Image (cartoon, rainbow, N blue to C red):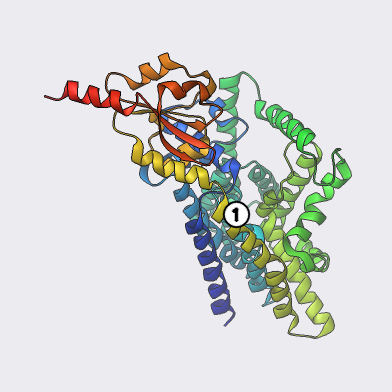
Amino acid sequence: MRGLAFGALVLATMVARLVLLETGPEIDPDAYAHAMAGRRVLEGTHGVELHWVWLPLWHWLHALALRFGSGIDTMRALNVGMSAIAPVLLVSVLRRPGVPGALPWLAGAVLALSPTLLVHGATSQLEPPVLTLTLAACLAWERKHWLIGILGGLALAAAALIRYEAWAVVLALSLLWVRERSRERAPIWLVPLVAIGAWCLHHRLATGQWFQFLAYNADFAHGYLEGVGYPWGSQPNAPLALLWYVVAVPWIEHAVLAPLSLLGAVWFVRSAPRSLMVAQISMLAFLAIGFAAGQHLGLARHGLVIGPLYATCMAAGVVRAQELVRRRVLIALSLAALFFVRSVPRYLDGLERHRTAYREELTAAHALRRIVGERDAVFCDRAPVEVLSSLPPARFTRWPLRDVDAFQLRRAAGDCGRAIIVSDAENTAHLRALTEPVYKNGSLLVLAYPPATTAKRCAQATRP
């Protein structure tokens, strides 16, 4: 019965994410930057500078998605599936002797109803796959079989080439292995260690510096937070940063269930499967110390990778509280509170954001697909328009439109093609006399060079 109810919940949350996927385009601005990196990979750009401070695997997958699918929406669909698998993996990891019977199912349900997983599981961001892949590695650890261990190592290697939090898991599991010395489990940390080492060596050979991305990360985070501010104010505060993912993010995610995690934290440290415990605690430490050290932005969505920690501690707290008050209805009340206080409001907000976000860019991208001919080149300085158009990356020139002049338009158009320009009115003001407007929506313009009359004369001149 528990399994059926849990399966229905997982299916319902997957359907809810599919509704977001169909409602509107990608809502996360950072996701478009990753998609653009993937488009450059497809163009043949492979230097480490392409990935900036990020890791490469997600960009390579974006390139594959564009080559064989519909680009960013294919990646969003992948994340919808990944987000549905994660709660199932958490239940599988927790179902073992010594774990109270209701706890795994409750932890999986809390993770499935996590507001960030509900909404960001329909984006193409990096946290959902890392969440799922690290849980897969933990499940492989608990199964203790050499073939499953190799598969777990490949899963963790993939996670380690997507987000840095997985590096902490590799270190934690290697230390756990030193204590347990299990040959079947060795690949789970050895395979990702090789992947991390290969990437670091490649980066060193390309840049001449070891771990250059750490300095770039710190510079970017410092500049961004200095301009935008921290979650608590304008000044850095190391103690608050250390507590951000311990206290604030659980409250943001789970509201009234967050205090119950204090009851469950002791059980988690003492009795949770060792692989899950060390993996989640290591990523919590990575996030907390990294934020205090100025290595990342402290975004609440980063906490999704330690969603199993929050969910399991809260589930253990609810089970313990139920034992203390002797009220079996407490589990149902806890899930109802999470659903109505956090999950539903955040989902409805996400639904509205999907309805409204990047609407101008989406309609301009659709128009661009209709307008661009086989010989046309595109000048575009709006990354979301290029990504949402799904046109081949080689068709685009990504210069700032303020720097484009008549000579460059003529050269791009060639003898009988056209140069299509996509930007706002201000950036294209100096090109208006040379071009013809073919689309306008809000602040975005699509212009064509040469105008239709010139293009018609060219077609007549080349007709046999």
Which secondary structure, mark 1?
A: helix
Q: As rendered, which of 104 and 270 lies closer to the eye? A: 104
Residue drawn at x 70%, y 52% is 303
Number of marks drawn: 1
Asked whether, in this view, residue 273 is left or right of residue 143, the answer is: right
Read off the residue under disc 1.
Answer: 353
Q: Amino acid at mark 1?
A: Arg
| Residue 425 coordinates in the image, percent (x, y) | 53, 31
Hey, which quadrant is residue 51 in on the image?
top right
Bin the neighbour count of mark 1 within 10 Å (Cα to Cα): few under 14, some 14-19, many 20 and up: some
Q: As rendered, which of 284 and 463 lies closer to the eye? A: 463
Quadrant location of the C terminus?
top left
Quadrant location of the N terminus?
bottom right
Q: As rendered, which of 186 and 440 lies closer to the eye? A: 440
Asked whether, in this view, residue 230 is left or right of residue 373, the answer is: right
Residue drawn at x 40%, y 46% is 70
